[in-house]
Image (tube, helix red, strand yellow):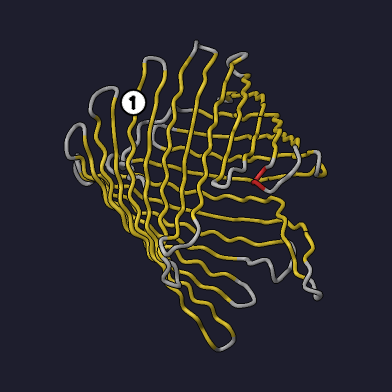
Amino acid sequence: MAIATAATPALPQGLTLSGSLSQGVTVSDNNGFQGRDPEVDGSTSLSYALSSSTKRSSFSIGGNASLSYGTDSDTKFNRSGLRASYQRSAKRSSFSAGLSFDKRPFEFDEEQPDLSFISLDTDRTTVSGNVGFGFEHTPRLSSNVSASLRDQDFSTTSTELSPSTTTSLSGGLSYRLSSTSSMGVNAGITMVDTEAADNLESTSVNIGANYSRTVNDRVSYSGNIGLSMSEQTRIIGLASVTEDSSNLTFGANLNRSLKDGAMSFGFNQGVGTSASGALSLNTGLTGNISRQINERQRWALGASLSRQSDLDGGETETLLRVSPSYNFSLTPKIGASAGYTFSRNDVGDTSHSLSLSISRSYEQRIR
């Protein structure tokens, strides 16, 4: 969890209407390594927001909607949502709050009396809210606390669907060791209440620490370590079954700015225990580089390698992904992009995806 300082800079004043409209097309082959034939999917997305700001506070309300269509699906609304947020800062404290509503189609498989499965569609609705406080105790020491509540429901009643309510609380401390380095600690708890045929209640607790340092105006690095512990209780009639699991993770990141771009490398490692006591090892490597060709053109290349191993002699899963991309600004408000993703798993299966998009942003100051 990132540790933010309490004070925020003064915000520009005014009332602004902004948004964007985008059109995208994706061509994929063997998507998800499921042996699918080549597919062509398209989407049209609209986002909008009305924001107001003063020197110390800001408020925004907006929404989004998207339409999807493709060779193997009907044209339908893929997503619609509304959101509102408020921020306010004082000399040594800050406050933020937000509300959001999201509705999107959801496909699931329902088991029939003859033990066969049929694919059905429903709508998944998510309503969430959050509040957060930040405090600057001294020029070097700051803290923050936050809370969030999320409710998820479905338009169709089925034993395969599980409406849930999630409550989260978190907090952290950040200490600036010097002008170039800082460290922090954080902790949080998440409680999930799932409404199902056998009610499921889960509680997760996580604690962590992080350190970051800026070597010079081009190079910086950071590291983190965290421990999470979860407990799941399944209530069946008058009986209950409790399962415990834990996960220890650590990671490191190196960032370097280039003359006309930037590059970064990341490493993360995790060791976990399941409810049955099985040990698993998860390893991830990432690398990214981007360069600005000129004021209108930019390219980027990203790569990742993930490996999940069962330390008790089970299977090992490896996934390699390489993603080059290119962005071109036709005008200050109209941009186009092209991207390609190559994926390969540990058994040699490959998948390919090519995406093209064009977008138009707008911004109008009302007063």
Estimate how packed mark 1 is, as few (under 14), some (14 to 19) or many (20 or more) residues with alpha carbons within 10 Å: some
81 or 208: which is nearer to us?
Answer: 208
Q: Is residue 340 above or below residue 284?
A: above
Which x, y percent locates residue 213?
A: 24, 35
**Is 271 on the left or on the right of 31, as rendered?**
left
7 or 245: which is nearer to us?
Answer: 245
**Residue found at x 76% / y 41%:** 37
308 or 299: which is nearer to us?
Answer: 308
**Is 3 on the left or on the right of 100, as rendered?**
left
Query: How many callouts does the rendering have?
Result: 1
When asked about the image quadrant of residue 227, the answer is bottom left
Which x, y percent locates residue 304?
A: 47, 38
| Image quarter hosting the C terminus | top right
Which x, y percent locates residue 157?
A: 73, 68
**Residue found at x 32% / y 58%:** 207
State the residue position of label 1.
256
Which x, y percent locates residue 197?
A: 64, 76
**Residue found at x 45% / y 74%:** 243
**Residue found at x 64% / y 35%:** 352
Residue found farthest to the top: 294
330 or 298: which is nearer to us?
Answer: 298
Q: Is residue 42 above or below residue 296?
A: below
Secondary structure under badge 1? strand
**Is 151 on the left or on the right of 53, as rendered?**
right
Residue found farthest to the left: 178
The amino acid type, in three-letter code, at marker 1 is Arg
Residue found farthest to the bottom: 238
